[in-house]
Amino acid sequence: MQIKILNIEDSLNRKLIKFESAIGIGAGIWVGDLPILGEVTDIEFDIDDDLEWGKNITITEEHTSMITIKNDHLSFIAQVISYERDGCLTVNLGETIVFLDLENAPLNIKDWIVVKAKSIRLFPTNM
């Protein structure tokens, strides 16, 4: 996912990065060399939260990918591509494919979902 760095907050050896993407504004902990404010870069992200169906992942009526920050949580809306029996949920977030580990989900998910997460790590892809 291509992002533009909007803010860098360096505290307690954690680098909280606020970013803008084509589908909204988000934030997460940067892993790697500190980016430059205003830099446009490509990232991958990991969600460290335990994702559980009905708790922090639910179906939504929205049908447009987006990222927002609400109440200290990163929220995003994505389209489900597939869900495997091993708990791997594959979604399309804008033009980015994201793999999520999910528990207790129905096997026939074929819709749009909203995900709410508190612990997000951002990794530069160096592309």
Image (cartoon, helix red, strand yellow):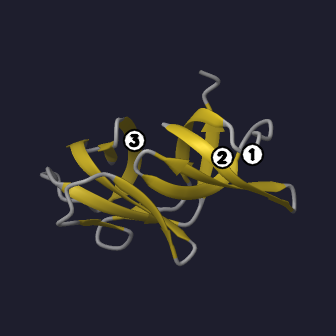
The residue under label 3 is: 99
Residue pushed farthest front?
A: 38
In the rendered structure, find residue 120 and report the number of the disc placed on it. none
For the residues marked 1 and 2, what is the alpha-carbon distance in whole angstroms?
Answer: 5 Å
**Disc 1 vs disc 2: Cβ atoms closer than 8 Å?**
yes
**Which quadrant would residue 95 be assigned to in this image?**
top left
Left or right position of 105 against 21: left
For the residues marked 2 and 3, what is the alpha-carbon distance in whole angstroms?
Answer: 23 Å
Which SS class for mark 3?
A: strand
Report the residue at 31% width, 51% height from top. Answer: 65
Image coords of residue 123 (percent x, y) = 63, 38
Which SS class for mark 2?
A: strand
Report the residue at 29% width, 62% height from top. Answer: 104
User: Mark 2 Cα within 10 Å, few/some/many (few <14, many 20+)?
Assistant: some
Report the residue at 54% width, 44% height from top. Answer: 45
Closer to the camera in the image, 106 or 109: 109
The residue under label 1 is: 37
Identify the amino acid type marked 2.
Ile
Q: Earlier in the sequence, mark 3 or mark 1?
A: 1
Image coords of residue 102 (percent x, y) = 36, 55
Identify the amino acid type marked 1.
Leu
Closer to the camera in the image, 75 or 119: 75
In the rendered structure, find residue 5 and report the number of the disc placed on it. 2
**Disc 3 vs disc 1: Cβ atoms closer than 8 Å?**
no
Q: Is 107 situated above or below 57?
A: above
Q: Is 26 situated above or below 35?
A: below
